[in-house]
Amino acid sequence: MSALYNTSFNMSDSFTGKNKTMPRTLLILLILYIGSVNAQQQSPEVESKFKSLKWLEGRWERSNVKPGMKANEQWQVYAPYQLKGIGVMMKGEDTVFLEKIQIIIKEGNIYYVADVKENKAPVYFKFTSVTPHGFICENPEHDFPKKIVYELNGSKLVVTISDDSKSQNYFFIRL
């Protein structure tokens, strides 16, 4: 009778095989979660546009920097719908600018996400155009830039950031 009312639970029993219900339940929940994540397919149009951005992968050295400075961007495919990058500017051995960047799909749209220490949170720029050789993304609510344009020409890349009154060009060469 006392075994019927034994409500004590020993966590180590779950991992030694004495209580097989918990590990099985966790495994089933994990399989269901992975299945639901994989089931969240993108529209064919968004998926195709995202796949066309894979040309960005690699290391890009900036060519229009001041003497004594070096700058580059590096991109890699991190997941099926995520490109991760980093932009760095160096003066000698010192990092003077660091930007974590990524391109993701969120809620059926493609976004360029810029994370710099000057902003309280990462800034999302929604893609407004994708071509085989570039893209445009915009965030009209952001102070500067409001618009980011990447244009590929062979092994050269021009990145333009702008708002309504000014524009800056950055020239890169693929390494």
Image (cartoon, rainbow, N blue to C red):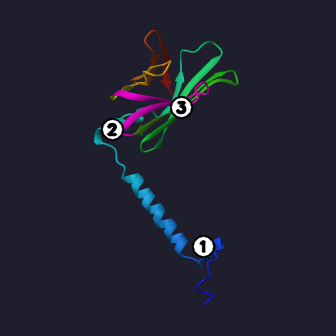
As helix, strand or loop, the secondary structure at mark 3 comes to loop
Q: Which residue is mark 1?
A: 14
Q: Residue furthest right?
A: 93
User: Residue 138 location, x and y as percent?
Assistant: 41, 24
Mark 2 or mark 1, earlier in chain: 1
- The residue drawn where x is 63% and y is 17% is 69
Q: Residue furthest top?
A: 165
Magenta residues? 107-129
Is 126 included in the stretch rendered in magenta? Answer: yes
User: Residue 16 location, x and y as percent?
Assistant: 62, 75
Measure the C-alpha gap from mark 3 to mark 1: 41 Å
Measure the C-alpha gap from mark 2 to mark 1: 44 Å
User: Residue 49 location, x and y as percent?
Assistant: 34, 35
Q: Which residue is mark 2?
A: 46
Q: Say which of marks 2 and 1 sits in front.
A: 1
Q: Which residue is mark 3?
A: 122
